[in-house]
Image: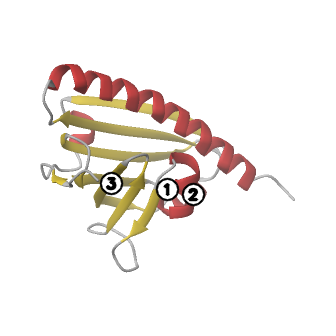
């Protein structure tokens, strides 16, 4: 099993300003509270991202809470940098088995109607391994493709959860 490595302790702004930043946007068939609940729920995360989530902090969850993600051949330890129920969750990778130097992601939820919202998933990273530029670009491309696929799964998950009956 690969060893966990420490990443740079970046702030919430890094998700929008880091060296390899991107934003994925998606209309979501759920209220802002339903989407926020899904983002914090470990079982839901497993369904839409394929990762096991273990919150390693006690409730209530909020800024400073920690969680560990495992799956897809990786382990990631994260800290919550911003927590605004129904509006925003920002997470920083503190330690991971991936050869990254820094990573942060910021989920911003904006209502569009009473039963729909838009999710802006900002993320940025810096590759920490050898052949940095080449592998960093490949990681960024793979993350963007995987992220779009994951957002499609999230939409299906929430669409089923909000169907009447």
Q: x, y (%) of residue 32?
A: 56, 53
User: Looking at this view, is 59 or 101 the one in front?
Assistant: 101
**Picture quadrant of residue 80:** bottom left
Q: x, y (%) of residue 97?
A: 25, 49
Horizontal side of 139 relative to 70 (left or right) equals: left
Q: x, y (%) of residue 1?
A: 29, 53
Horizontal side of 156 relative to 18 (left or right) equals: right
User: Looking at this view, is 68 or 129 the one in front?
Assistant: 129
Gap between marks 2 and 1, in whole Å?
7 Å
User: Looking at this view, is 140 or 12 the one in front?
Assistant: 140
Q: Residue at x 24, y 25 (%)?
A: 135
- Disc 2 designates what residue? 44
Total numbered labels placed on residues in the image: 3
Q: Residue at x 37, y 24 (%)?
A: 141
Give neighbour class at mark 2: few <14, some 14-19, many 20+ (Cα, 10 Å). some
Q: Residue at x 18, y 50 (%)?
A: 11
Quadrant of the drawing holding the C terminus: bottom right
Q: Residue at x 33, y 29 (%)?
A: 22
Q: Secondary structure at mark 2?
A: helix
Question: Which scheme is used to colour this image of the protein?
Answer: secondary structure
Give neighbour class at mark 1: few <14, some 14-19, many 20+ (Cα, 10 Å). some
Q: Closer to the observer: label 2 or label 1?
A: 2
Classify 60 as above or below 141. below
**Picture quadrant of residue 66:** bottom left
Q: Closer to the observer: label 3 or label 1?
A: 3
Marks 3 and 1 in Cβ contact (< 8 Å) = no
Q: Earlier in the sequence, mark 3 or mark 2?
A: 2
Gap between marks 3 and 1, in whole Å?
18 Å
Q: Which mark is residue 39?
A: 1
- Disc 3 designates what residue? 75
Q: Earlier in the sequence, mark 2 or mark 1?
A: 1
């Amino acid at each position: 099993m690969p060893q966990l490595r420490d990443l740079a302790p970046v702030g919430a702004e890094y998700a929008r300003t880091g060296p390899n930043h991107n934003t994925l946007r998606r209309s979501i068939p759920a209220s802002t509270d339903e989407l926020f609940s899904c983002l914090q729920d470990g079982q839901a995360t497993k369904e839409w991202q394929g990762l096991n989530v273990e919150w390693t902090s006690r409730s209530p969850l909020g800024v400073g809470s920690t969680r560990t993600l495992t799956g897809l051949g990786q382990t990631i330890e994260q800290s919550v940098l911003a927590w605004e129920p129904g509006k925003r969750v920002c997470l920083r990778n503190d330690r991971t088995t991936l050869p990254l130097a820094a990573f942060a992601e910021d989920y911003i939820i904006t209502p569009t109607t009473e039963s729909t919202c838009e999710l802006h998933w900002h993320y940025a990273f810096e590759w920490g391994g050898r052949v940095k530029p080449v592998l960093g670009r490949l990681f960024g491309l793979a993350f963007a493709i995987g992220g779009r696929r994951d957002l499609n799964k999230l939409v299906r998950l929430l669409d089923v959860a909000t169907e009447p009956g």
